[in-house]
Image (cartoon, rainbow, N blue to C red):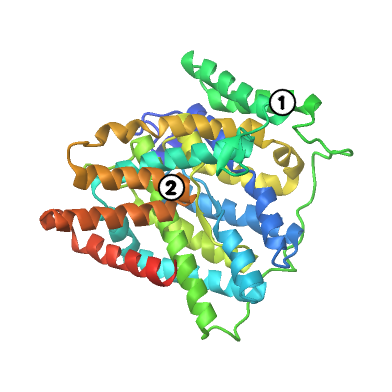
């Protein structure tokens, strides 16, 4: 009976998937996302926010947004407070600009409300759908390189160099050696077509990491814990500066970051999961965009920075996740983490980051769509693909590649291949680079 209800709700048979596959996919994605439960409170605490309360807000906003993604959009995508946006919140809006964290939360609330309105009017949907097929493929490849870069940095396999931008990390480090072992284990299991290969690799490295001190199990480790109170940050808004230049700049930057990070992630994940319609557009795109808009609004009320679709969702898609049941598992685990956080926070990056590296390989499949002979297509494709990891930003990669695409098409007399929406978008991108950097 349960199987029938889930099949009807998430269209499992229609999407050629099973409950077991979706559960494994959800577990895998959550484990690659769980770091946000520790990192977000740490970053926002620099703005003066209570880290324990931010932990609760992080888990709740992720749970709420991902539940909406599960039931409303039926897509295998997890959402949570975004990296990058939280740093902008703490280090730029609060510390550099001298505003209060209450001011920053008010800006996040405005962003969420604006996104709900834009989504209802199908403006965000039109922006996503205006991208030509080859640029969508480029975004998927770029995200692959981007998350591979994140995985390599997080494992310590590469690090910031002295005199050079990057160099190899310390291969005598237990964390680096375990990360490499994780890559090998995942590769062997994938080659043997073992179901849940990526999840198994995470679990094995987490266990092996205990005696090496890589997996941190604190003294007095407790399975159950009550979630910290939200009261220090719940609904703490500052209405006194809503008509200031600082507020306008903050809202504009957050709108840009959220819009194009989510756009890139949705396109990348949907391409990898083959969840595109006959026109090459993401299925249920309006519903997916509404999920992160609702989550951002809820996150502001709860007390956290903007919430976005997570690129780590590609890890679950690589395990076969295709429906909202994968997202539901992610959401349930975020909500459970409120009570059993010590378990999830013990999983080291040495266990999860190798999975991001492997998924980066999977995401490069659309590179076969690159037409090398047509430079008005291949140059923008290449720029999107390399600028995402090199600028460490999905949004900036989309900006540079789109500008190149529009300019090359115009200069080569191929304006008929450009839509009005993408031309307007290119003008907006140029203004953004000139005035906001």
Mark before the other along the chain sequence, 1 or 2: 1
Query: Where's residue 124, x and y in %?
Result: 34, 61
Q: Is residue 38 above or below residue 57?
A: above
In the picture, the disc for residue 172 is 1
Where disc 1 sits, the SS reads: loop
Query: Where's residue 404, x and y in %?
Result: 27, 54
Q: Quick one: which residue is furthest to the right in this view?
A: 220
The residue at the point 23 percent across, 57 percent down is 406
Q: Quick one: which residue is furthest to the top in this view?
A: 192
Q: Residues within 10 Å of mark 2 (few under 14, many from 20)?
A: many
Residue 49 or residue 21, whichever sits in front: 49
Residue 286 or residue 253, whichever sits in front: 253
Q: Is residue 353 left or right of residue 113?
A: right
- Quarter containing the C terminus: bottom left
Q: Quick one: which residue is furthest to the front in this view?
A: 163
Q: Is residue 97 above or below residue 294?
A: below
Q: Is residue 62 above or below residue 77?
A: below
Q: Is residue 28 left or right of residue 413?
A: right
Contact flag, marks 1 and 2 (Cβ < 8 Å): no
The residue at the point 58 percent across, 19 percent down is 185
In the picture, the disc for residue 388 is 2
Query: Where's residue 205, x and y in %?
Result: 67, 25
Quarter location, residue 23:
top right
Query: Where's residue 347, x and y in %?
Result: 69, 35
The residue at the point 28 percent across, 67 percent down is 427
Q: Residues within 10 Å of mark 1 (few under 14, many from 20)?
A: few
Q: In this rendering, does residue 198 appear at all?
A: yes
Q: In this rendering, does residue 235 appear at all?
A: no
In the picture, the disc for residue 334 is none
């Amino acid at each position: 009976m349960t199987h029938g209800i889930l099949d009807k709700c998430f269209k499992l048979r229609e999407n050629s998937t099973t409950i077991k596959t979706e559960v494994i996919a959800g577990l895998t994605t959550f484990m690659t996302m769980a770091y946000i439960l520790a990192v977000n409170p740490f970053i926002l605490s620099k703005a003066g926010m209570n880290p324990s309360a931010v932990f609760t807000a992080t888990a709740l906003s992720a749970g709420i947004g991902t539940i909406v993604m599960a039931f409303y959009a039926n897509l295998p995508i997890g959402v949570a407070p975004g990296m990058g946006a939280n740093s902008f919140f703490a280090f730029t809006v609060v510390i550099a600009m001298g505003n209060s964290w209450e001011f920053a939360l008010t800006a996040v609330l405005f962003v969420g409300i604006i996104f709900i309105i834009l989504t209802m009017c199908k403006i965000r949907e039109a922006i996503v759908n205006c991208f030509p097929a080859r640029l969508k493929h480029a975004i998927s490849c770029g995200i692959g390189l981007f998350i591979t870069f994140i995985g390599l940095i997080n494992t310590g396999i590469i690090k910031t160099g002295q005199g050079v931008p990057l160099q190899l990390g310390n291969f005598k480090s237990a964390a680096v050696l375990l990360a490499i072992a994780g890559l090998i284990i995942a590769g062997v299991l994938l080659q043997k077509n073992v179901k849940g290969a990526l999840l198994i690799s995470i679990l094995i490295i987490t266990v092996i990491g205990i005696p090496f001190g890589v997996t941190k199990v604190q003294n007095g480790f407790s399975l159950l814990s009550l979630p910290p109170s939200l009261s220090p940050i719940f609904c703490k808004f500052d209405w006194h500066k809503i008509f200031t230049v600082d507020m306008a700049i903050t809202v504009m930057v957050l709108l840009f970051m959220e819009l194009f990070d989510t756009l890139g992630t949705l396109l990348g994940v949907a391409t990898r999961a083959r969840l595109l319609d006959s026109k090459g557009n993401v299925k249920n795109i309006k519903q997916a965009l509404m999920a992160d808009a609702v989550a951002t609004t809820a996150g502001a009320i709860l007390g956290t920075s903007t919430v976005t679709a997570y690129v780590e969702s590609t890890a679950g898609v690589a395990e076969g996740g295709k429906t909202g049941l994968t997202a539901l598992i992610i959401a349930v685990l975020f909500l459970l983490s409120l009570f059993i956080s010590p378990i999830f926070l013990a999983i080291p990056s040495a266990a999860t980051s190798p999975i991001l590296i492997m998924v980066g390989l999977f995401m490069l499949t659309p590179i076969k769509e690159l037409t090398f002979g047509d430079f008005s297509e291949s140059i923008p494709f290449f720029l999107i693909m390399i600028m995402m990891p090199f600028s460490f930003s999905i949004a900036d990669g989309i900006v540079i590649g789109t500008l190149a695409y529009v300019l090359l098409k115009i200069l080569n007399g191929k304006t008929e291949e450009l839509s009005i929406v993408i031309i307007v978008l290119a003008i907006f991108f140029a203004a953004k680079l000139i005035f906001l950097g």
